[in-house]
Image (cartoon, rainbow, N blue to C red):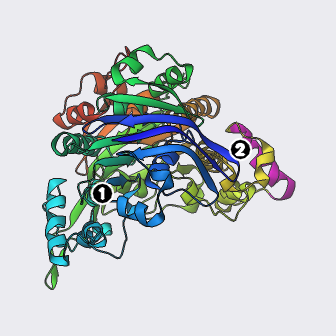
Amino acid sequence: MIALDHLSLSIHGTQILRDVSLDLAPGEIMGLVGESGSGKSMTALAIMGLLPQGARATGAIRLDGADLLTQSEAQLCAMRGNQIGMIFQEPMTALNPVQTIGDQVAETLIIHGKASRAEAQRIARDRLDRVGLSQIALARFPHELSGGQRQRACIAAAIARNPRLLIADEPTTALDVTTQAQILDLLKSLVTNEGMALLLITHDLAVVADMADRIGVMQSGQIVEMGPTAHVLAERRHPYTAALFAASSHRPTRTAQPAPEPLLRVENVIRSYPGPRRGLRRGPAVAAVNDVSFTLHKGESLGLVGESGCGKSTLTRAILGLDPVQGGDIQIFGQSIVPRMPAALRAGIQVVFQDPYGSFNPRWRVEKIVAEPFHLLANAPQGRARRDRVAEALSAVRLSPGDMVKYPHEFSGGQRQRIAIARALITRPKILVLDEAVSALDVSVRARILDLLAALQGELGLSYLFISHDLTVVRAITDRVLVMQAGQIVEEGPTTQVFDAPQHPYTRQLITAAPRLPDLERAHI
């Protein structure tokens, strides 16, 4: 149905794709895997006819024999959403924030002139029901939906016209393991029931291991290995495929030994929000964090896992002194931060977020970005001493001091995350809160960041509160793990014990939902 024949692509003279050939039949799932920058997304954009200015493509992209590279823009517009649908990684970016979900799903039908507005709304309702959003009204806006619901809405919009080819570009990267499993099951059912072809683009081999009929491995704009999924994963003939496979299950060497010295105590913490309005009154308060207690020791790495909406982020904000609590106590270095964190304590606990680029001022040079937390210090270094501290922090994360004159856009995703870690280290904290710090990185970069975190912990004696929906990562980097559900800790214990012999049904559910690679002797999730 769709066939790429020796597709090559350059943008302003820079080669992006080199001699890419693949084909996809109706009812077939192909996984396209590789690191960030390997050319996966650009291949998808080439198929969709959404290449940037300055792009020059050679070869052919044939849909039922017609070469899409020779089509006019009007012909491509008629094809997009009609014969080929696409699901993007970040649904909040793909969705219009001021347009209702119903209108956005119906939009494709109206644009292609295949239905009246009333009929388009009826079909939109059907497509939303099909993707498991029967309880969501057409009049709801994107911000009123969870991350998983927004991704389902994007899928509903992509399949509104029953396209013959569906392209899913990293559709589950930001989702928790149970929601991810639901989305993958949904995509698989669409292929089975609708007979459409699915091109699943991801950096995670585990995601496609149980999904794809065939796998294509991309490196530097080329497909270096392709074949049936089981064969490629078992043989791993190309060194790059073997490297991806190894990175997917990488566990850093950790030398830090936790000491019986509590740095963070959370005792019976309650954080609630006002209930929804019912007429002139509000309903009962909703407890996002309900009677949570735990301790983080010096040199310890503590994992916090659970589905989106379980209370992880709310608890994190309370620990960082950003949100008040309605009950209980939080102590950092033996001092309570309730009701307000003392200014002198803020430098001792720092945070690294999922998206470093979103937390950087793009107009600032790296030196200013890394030095930003100095405002927390009563006697912050100045002049040459300030530059020396920034250079020291950059060296600690394996970057060059010369990088301080550059801007964020000049770095890769992994390098930007190193800059974020350097910024967190600049005040010489004792505790780092890592909030989904590696979830947006491809497996090779993720492995290197985990190695860096393990090395820093050994060198500096840091304590980590590691919040993640990626159970493989949590198993690799933590000593103990807390499992959170509906605002409560339902299970806790040594990481190996919790993952090998989970006691709570919810923990077992999370572990079962996690994607896993075959034939990995050390994998237990």
In the figure, residue 1 lies in which quadrant? top left
Q: Residue at x 64, y 30 (%)?
A: 459
Is residue 6 or residue 467 the one in the foreground? 6
> Would you say 345 lies left or right of 267 here?
right
> Would you say 118 lies left or right of 105 here?
left
User: Which region of the structure is painted magenta?
Assistant: 382-396
Is residue 438 or residue 40 the one in the foreground? 40
Residue type at numbered disc 2:
Ala
Q: Secondary structure at mark 2?
A: helix
Q: Residue at x 50, y 54 (%)?
A: 70
Q: Which numbered disc flags the more N-terminal residue, 1 or 2? A: 1
> Would you say 239 lies left or right of 136 here?
right
Q: Residue at x 79, y 54 (%)?
A: 405
Which mark is on residue 19?
Answer: none
Residue 231 spot, x, y in % from top left = 37, 17
Please, what is the dominant secondary structure of the magenta stretch?
A: helix
Q: From what the image shows, is residue 105 above or below residue 159?
A: below
Residue type at numbered disc 1:
Ala
Which mark is on residue 393?
Answer: 2
Disc 1 to disc 2, how far (Cα)? Answer: 45 Å
In the figure, residue 496 lies in which quadrant? top left
Q: Nearer the viewer, mark 1 or mark 2?
A: 1
Specify whether residue 470 is painted magenta.
Answer: no
Is residue 142 or residue 401 the one in the foreground? 142
Residue to which mark 1 is pinned: 158
Residue sitting at the far right: 384
Can residue 126 be seen from the camera position used here?
A: yes
